[in-house]
Amino acid sequence: MRLLKTGPYVPGAEKLELIEKWGVDIPHYAILSHTWSSNPDDEVLFADVLNGISTTKPAYSKLEQAMKRAMLDGYGWLWIDTCCINKSSSVELSEAINSMYSYYKNAQKCYAYLVDVDASDHQVVNSSFAKSRWWKRGWTLQELLAPSTLEFFASNWQSLGYKYELRPIISSITGIDDDYLRPPPATSPFDTVENPGLPVEHASIAKRMSWASTRETTREEDLAYCLIGLFEVNMPMLYGEGGQRAFYRLQEEIMGANEDQSLFAWIKLEDDKTTVNGLHGLLADSPRDFRHTGSVIPYSALADYSVTTVTARGLSVTLPLTQKADGKMIAALQCPVQGRYNDWLAVYLQKLNIGSNVYARADCNKLASVSERGKPQGLYVRQPPNFVPRTVYPDHFFQLRSLSAHWEDSELAEYEVINVICDKSRYALKGTSQYRAIPLAEPQPWSLAPMIYRVDKTEGALTATLVMRRKTDGESLLLLLGAGRDLSAAFGICEFGDVFPTNIELQQVFRPRPAGQYMELDYHTVRVQVEEIVRLEQKIYFLDIEITARPVAPTASEMIEDAIDAFDVFHKPGVERKAAKGALLGKMKRFRLT
């Protein structure tokens, strides 16, 4: 630990003195809490002290007044983050950040300097004291909570009072319960034993997070780093990783040290855009997600569950699950519902189609509750649930799932798959040992071709071509199935003559188009919807084929010939007569005569 000598200095001396001490050799010291200048270079930095130019810096008066205050209180040494940390050393910076909570906790006294506060205006909620920037900064949260003795000072260094004296207004400003603003009885000359304060570690994870939910930091990663000491964990500083990733790492460290499941009791605001298709991981993105859940507490007696751990598949956690009517799961946390302490607080989970027992959090804008817990189950929760990016598996398969057709005349809206053009190695047939784990698709009346095909994953490669026919008039089309960019499923359509084209010829005309697009021919519009499911190291593309039929107008000679045939059978029994009449009306509809 590096400390600044407060004095006395030899008259005329311009260079300040720094010492380094460790462990039991650290002397009694005071510590300064403040907000940095808008221009960090205005502060007295470590290099400025070494170079003897401290007095030339605009913020020197702040440092000078803190040193004088410490000397008056009998402290020969002062710690201040501006000049007691060599920030050019990433190792030293990381060590200081991991130790900072203990620096403030072990200090004999802390001076909180509020540069934007008038000494005559600090006793009411709307005062300059309440509006000070100091209350909004991330780092000052631990600087408020850690010291047992903290005195506030206005811009002119006039005392505003001690933390214990200002508890009511501090609590209203910060949302921190009065219990955590009172000093422990062993170190407090002001409180009685009957009314001691509570250690910060007694507050639930959710409560401590809520205290930080309205605070800000200049660097986004610092919103996580400034909470390290508050949760009694350690982690390396990785500036550049981003605020979200830093906060994930903080929560992972907390999970390793604390089983308090209020860590999972957060909610997203309605306008939050950080979910993926409405889904999210089990960890929050920011302390802001705990703004409205600070009252959540954990049960004291924890169930005998496996410890939550981080794996490549997601968070491995054991939670009691209850299934809802819509298929979502309600996962009970080891936390009671406030006011109904016989019930369990819960979150909503949705199963992901990327393997067995993998979930994501759903309905993140609310929490649930259950009066009876379901059966505890080990599961994985993806963090975040971005499983859609084109991951590659040993085998990819197309599986035909549904075929639907539409037109105003239902007779015209009947299609079937009558054949397939592909290399037979693409078939995923029953009994083939290499594909024995593939679920067998039930034959469908609308397909005479196999239902499952092994995908050629090469970009632009054609896997199979389905020959499709409209039952009413025999109009046919070819639906091409293949691979697009980034291992996506892709499709194409074309017409053909009297002879089926070869697979090689079809490959030459295959122009992959992504799922969901409408593809048009003269007499058909086709769209293929895809659902990707991964199971047993195999990705399956379930295909839902939609066709909108377009009529083919018959020629005049065809109409006359059909009319003669129809009148020919009008004298026959009722059933045949009805069928003939229907056929004629169908022809007339297609000719748009009705």
Image (cartoon, helix red, strand yellow):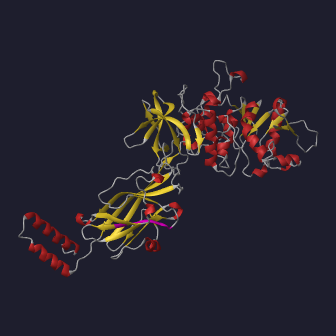
Determine the image quadrant of residue 215: top right
Task: Please name the residue shown 23% across and 77% down the image.
Answer: 554
Q: Can residue 550 be found in the magenta stretch?
A: no
In the image as oriented, which residue stretches furthest toward the left? 571
| Quarter placement of the N terminus | top right
- Residue 259 in picture, x, y percent from top left: 58, 32
In the image as oriented, which residue stretches furthest toward the bottom? 557
Q: Main structural element of the magenta stretch: helix, strand or loop?
A: strand
- Residue 537 in picture, x, y percent from top left: 51, 50
Task: Please name the residue shown 84% across and 48% down the image.
Answer: 47
Q: Is residue 472 visible?
A: yes
| Quarter placement of the C terminus | bottom left
Give the magenta-colored segment's residue range: 460-467
Q: Is residue 18 left or right of residue 323?
A: right
Residue 109 vs residue 593, the one in the foreground: 593
Can you say whether 171 is above or below 414 in the image? above
Can you say whether 254 is above or below 190 in the image? below
In the image as oriented, which residue stretches furthest toward the top? 194
Mark count: 0
Task: Please name the residue shown 68% across and 43% down the image.
Answer: 225
Determine the image quadrant of residue 2: top right
Residue 409 vs residue 393, the one in the foreground: 393
Residue 34 vs residue 24, the one in the foreground: 24
Q: Is residue 562 left or right of residue 392?
A: left
Can you say whether 351 is above or below 188 in the image? below
Q: Is residue 486 left or right of residue 464?
A: right
Can you say whether 313 is above or below 163 in the image? below
- Residue 79 in picture, x, y percent from top left: 80, 38
- Residue 183 in picture, x, y percent from top left: 68, 26
